[in-house]
Amino acid sequence: MTYLYSEIHSQPDIIREFIDSQSGNIASIAQAIRDYQPRFVVIAARGTSDNAARYAQYMFGIQLGLPVSLAAPSIHTLYDSAPDMKGALVIGISQSGQSEDVRQVITDAKSTGALTLAITNYESSPLAEQAHHHIHLCAGEEKSVAATKTYTTQLTAIALLTQHLAEDNAGIARINHLPDDMVATIDNAGGMAEWVQRYCHAERLAVIGRGYNYATAFEISLKIKELCYIVSEQYSEADFRHGPIAIISAGFPVIAIAPSGKTQPLMIDLLQQLQDKHADCIVITDTPTLAENFERHVLLPSGIPEWLTPICAVIPGQLFGYHLAHVKGYDIDQPRGLNKVTITQ
């Protein structure tokens, strides 16, 4: 058994522990943010954590009415410039908390009067120590290079912070059910190992999502690149129609994230177009009537609010990357050319 397999399956327990240990801290941070009254949010991150930041763009924008920008850390390091972020909530997200460029964004933001928050898996990391506030992911050491449990915990931290900021007690309570939803998702993906062999010789693939699950498309695509060395590209359903759909030919593999919610009718329409072009579609959805139209699908549990689906919907993508790397005979825990901690400047 690989570390990655164990870490994927540990996610329900990790999320349960995180909620239990960090809810009080997050409630206090939310109060500090309300007291500060930020006018906008800036988030600095790299890699997988950057995909968590994309999720935050939708959570804060839709549920809190706060505009969110993703920072360009090179402005702070390579170009030695510090934009004025007074009035902003500036968040640094990093598994290790060691990325120099993400830390520099937080340092510069503090110097201009911004309120700063770090979300990391290490309480004593440079990023955690630099920020005004810190959310500890409590995920334990992640031994596989490909991040899984730290990503879903980052999303849970963002979801919980959003609900506390909105003072939505029902939303906070719903997050407590996430571990059970994740267990069900893992169980429902159990048959994937039987059909993933089909993609053993695939050299390219597209992953499509929209809204809250735009981040999911990015993260699934990243896992497939890291683990399987496939040219996997991620798209918004809307952007995909504006040109990239031209790449689709018979048998082209497409992973579509299509849970219930605002984006599902548009995803269903796109899936019909893909079927007409004879694309090879893998569908992640909570809607049985949609899933039954596709031979290869993973069914999410019913009743998950759209804003929480990314925390479950990414798991089938993690497992797809794991199983495909296994049948290809690759080193799953140590993908070539990668390190667990990448320190960028």
Image: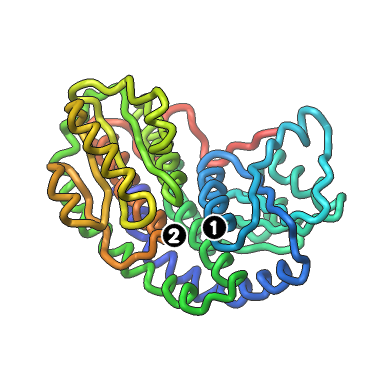
| Mark 1 surroundings within 10 Å by alpha-carbon count, few (fewer than 14), some (14 through 19), many (20 or more) | some
Q: Residue at x 51, y 79 (%)?
A: 169
Mark 1 residue element = helix
Please name the residue that numbered disc 2 is placed on.
307
Q: Residue at x 58, y 66 (%)?
A: 161
Mark 2 residue element = helix
Residue 334 appears in the picture as rendered: no
Q: Residue at x 41, y 44 (%)?
A: 210
68 vs 327, left or right, is right
Give, as a three-letter code, the residue at label 2: Trp
Number of marks: 2
Q: Quadrant of residue 80?
A: top right
Residue 32 appears in the picture as rendered: yes
Give, as a three-letter code, the residue at label 1: Ile
Q: Which mark, residue 62?
A: 1
Q: Residue at x 41, y 34 (%)?
A: 234
Q: Is residue 120 above or below residue 178?
A: above
Colouring of the image:
rainbow
Q: Is residue 337 above or below residue 281?
A: above
The C terminus - image quarter = top right
Residue toward you, 194 or 140: 194
Give how far across and how far down residue 202 sits, in percent.
Answer: 25, 24
| Mark 2 surroundings within 10 Å by alpha-carbon count, few (fewer than 14), some (14 through 19), many (20 or more) | some
**Cβ atoms at labels 1 and 2 below 8 Å apart:** yes
Say whether disc 1 or disc 2 marks the residue closer to the N-terminus: 1
